[in-house]
Image: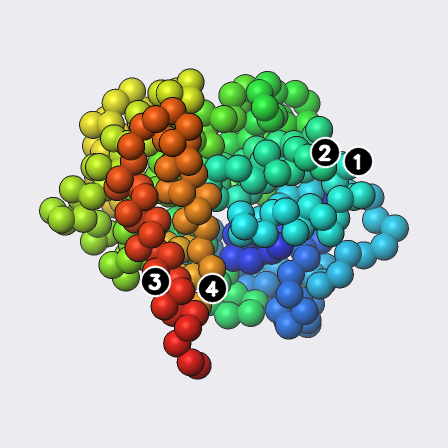
């Protein structure tokens, strides 16, 4: 079994390290980290224990290798570029999106009809070029055929992840799961990035009021889209967030805050920005989501303009 991971950052490299124990994995990343990982291995730390894992890591696609699965773990805004670069390869392979937000799967579907959506619930932090720290495992990784359904390729992928020690399951309606994950992203990532805090701080009063507003807007838009979220009501979700998810992820620094601090573009347009676009489609106002998206984009532009 051969697996290719495109755009391997913290998430892709962490997953590559685990999968390398049960299948043949090749990770494509930037030239500098690829060289370091090839020479020193990938150090995996945190919730999955400490180990050094070895697998092919390069900046260019190896020739004459057939892949059974291609996992796309780039930032959502890079999806189109990656698909254009590897379009011929994607066309004949099972392609799995492990990305944040909404919309990447639709972009990939323009290059292949063999798209599998994936929802990742673990937290990853890139500590250096060849070290990934797993902050917590907050739930199963979920896979499903897009636009809907489940088949042997999906169930086999979940089995591979389980064998590698990454809890996973297959679902027949991945769209609902993607929207449920995006709800989590919308309520935690942008406000943590704007305030510059870890998740554990977000249950405090002022932040929680904003999170509650975001939640209610996402539920309204999801309902208009015919999406069934994992939680029946906004209050059910907020209780889960405060009592279950945030305690597990309290020390995690969101990927969006990591991006701001590293002067990188964020994915807020595929998270809260996507909710605002769907809201406009249905005539639903989403002031909380729109405001947070604008604030994150301001922080993003501000950081990128500061001289190093």
Which of the marked residues, 2 or 1, is nearer the chain's N terminus?
Answer: 1
Pointer 1 residue: 92
Pointer 2 residue: 112
Which of the marked residues, 3 or 4, is nearer the chain's N terminus?
Answer: 4
Quarter that holds the N terminus: top right
Disc 3 is placed on an element classified as helix
- Mark 2 or 1: the one toward you: 2
Disc 2 is placed on an element classified as loop
Mark 2–mark 3 CB contact (< 8 Å): no
Q: Position of residue 31 (x, y in %)?
A: 67, 69
Pointer 3 residue: 299
Q: CA distance from mark 2 to mark 3?
A: 36 Å
Disc 4 is placed on an element classified as loop
Q: Report the residue at 41% width, 73% height from top.
A: 305
Q: CA distance from mark 4 to mark 2?
A: 29 Å
Badge 4 crowding class, 10 Å Cα cut-off, few under 14, some 14 to 19, many 20 or more, is some
């Amino acid at each position: 079994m051969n697996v290719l991971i495109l755009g391997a950052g913290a998430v892709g490299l962490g997953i590559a390290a685990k999968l390398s124990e049960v299948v043949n994995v090749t990770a494509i990343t930037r030239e500098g980290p690829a060289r370091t990982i090839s020479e020193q291995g990938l150090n995996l730390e945190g919730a999955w224990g400490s180990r050094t894992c070895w697998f092919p890591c390069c900046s260019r696609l190896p020739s004459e290798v057939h892949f059974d699965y291609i996992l796309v773990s780039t930032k959502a805004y890079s999806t189109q570029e990656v698909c254009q670069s590897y379009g011929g390869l994607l066309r004949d392979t099972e392609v799995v999106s492990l990305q944040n937000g909404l919309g990447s799967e639709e972009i990939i579907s323009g290059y292949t009809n063999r798209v599998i959506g994936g929802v990742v619930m673990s937290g990853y932090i890139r500590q250096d070029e060849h070290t990934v720290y797993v902050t917590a495992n907050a739930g199963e990784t979920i896979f499903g055929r897009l636009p809907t359904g489940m088949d042997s390729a999906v169930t086999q992928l979940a089995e591979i992840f389980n064998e590698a020690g990454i809890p996973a399951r297959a679902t027949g309606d991945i769209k609902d799961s993607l929207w449920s994950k995006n709800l989590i992203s919308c309520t935690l990532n942008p406000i943590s990035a704007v305030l510059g805090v870890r998740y554990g701080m977000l249950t405090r009063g002022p932040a929680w009021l904003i999170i509650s507003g975001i939640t209610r807007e996402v539920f309204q838009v999801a309902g208009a889209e015919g999406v069934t979220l994992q939680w029946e009501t906004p209050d059910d979700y907020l209780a889960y967030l405060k009592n279950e998810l945030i305690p597990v992820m309290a020390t995690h620094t969101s990927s969006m805050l990591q991006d701001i601090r590293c002067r990188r573009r964020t994915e807020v347009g595929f998270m809260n920005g996507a909710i605002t676009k769907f809201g406009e489609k249905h005539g639903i106002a989403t002031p909380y989501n729109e405001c947070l998206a604008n604030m994150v984009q301001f922080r993003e532009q501000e950081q990128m303009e500061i001289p190093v």
